[in-house]
Amino acid sequence: MTRFKLTYFDIDGGRGESIRIAFHIGGIDFEDVRVKGPEFREARQSFRFHALPVLEIDGRQVSQSNALLRYVGKLAGLYPADDLQALHCDEVIDAVEDLNHAVGRTFGLQGDAMKQAREELVKGRLATYVKGLDALLARGGGEYFADGRLTVADLKVVIETRTLAKGILDHVPTDLVERLAPALAAHRERIANDPRVVAYYAR
Ligand SMILES: N[C@@H](CCC(=O)N[C@@H](CS)C(=O)NCC(=O)O)C(=O)O
């Protein structure tokens, strides 16, 4: 049997969480290694590109969160077999990565610089991507992003829309998604309440 070891930060979110959920939904055994900041800094050089998540497959390390999510999604039955639906799924998860990079650039800023950067983000890329994702949800039929069922695209988006609502990003209004894209906010609730996702958090 293939041995999987996923290493990511010990947080309920970020680039690793949707991969953990996909493993769980697929009933695939994996070693769930959760590191804290100091451990990461110590071991950083050992991670490909010095970043997380990384997945070891029978001891061989692979990186890049979306590539990992797609791979685990295929194993777990959460990735479309149809090429066009797979393309739709990929478009969504790559759009979320664009957003992750845009938000990531504001980390580490302080005081007024942070306030200004976040306010620009809210009016600019965040608004564009929230509305864009809303349109992609409508394209998928309104409930799911692709294949008319739960796929890794839904998991990736819900981690993002939940993070935006948590109040952990200073100067980002927690009701941003509700205001700009009510259907995307409803999607967040639907996916969070999906019994397979609920079972992951209840484990
Ligand atoms: N393109 C990479 C980006 C990985 C990345 O930047 N990961 C962040 C955490 S979500 C990280 O390890 N940051 C720590 C650092 O760069 O020091 C991916 O999608 O996996």
Image (cartoon, helix red, strand yellow):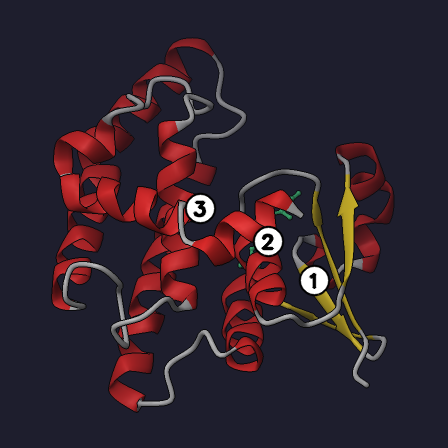
Question: Closer to us: mark 1 or mark 2?
Answer: 2
Q: Residue drawn at (22%, 46%), measured in percent from left and top?
A: 184
Specify whether 20 is left or right of 109.
right
Q: Is residue 148 visible in this depiction of the protein?
A: yes
The reply to whether discs 3 and 1 touch (Cβ–Cβ < 8 Å) is no
Q: Which mark is residue 54?
A: 1
Residue with the mark numbered 3: 159
| Local crowd size for mark 3, using a 10 Å CA cut-off: few (<14), some (14–19), many (≥20) | many
Q: Is residue 97 visible in this depiction of the protein?
A: no
Q: Which mark is residue 16?
A: 2
Q: Quadrant of the N terminus?
A: bottom right
SS at mark 1?
strand
Upstream in the sequence, badge 1 or badge 2? Answer: 2
Q: Quadrant of residue 39?
A: top right
* Image position, residue 100 (x, y; %): 42, 46
Amino acid identity at mark 3 = Ile
Q: Residue drawn at (58%, 39%), measured in percent from left and top?
A: 12
CA separation in Å, label 3 and label 2: 10 Å
The reply to whether discs 3 and 2 touch (Cβ–Cβ < 8 Å) is no
Q: Which mark is residue 187?
A: none
Specify whether 91 is left or right of 49.
left
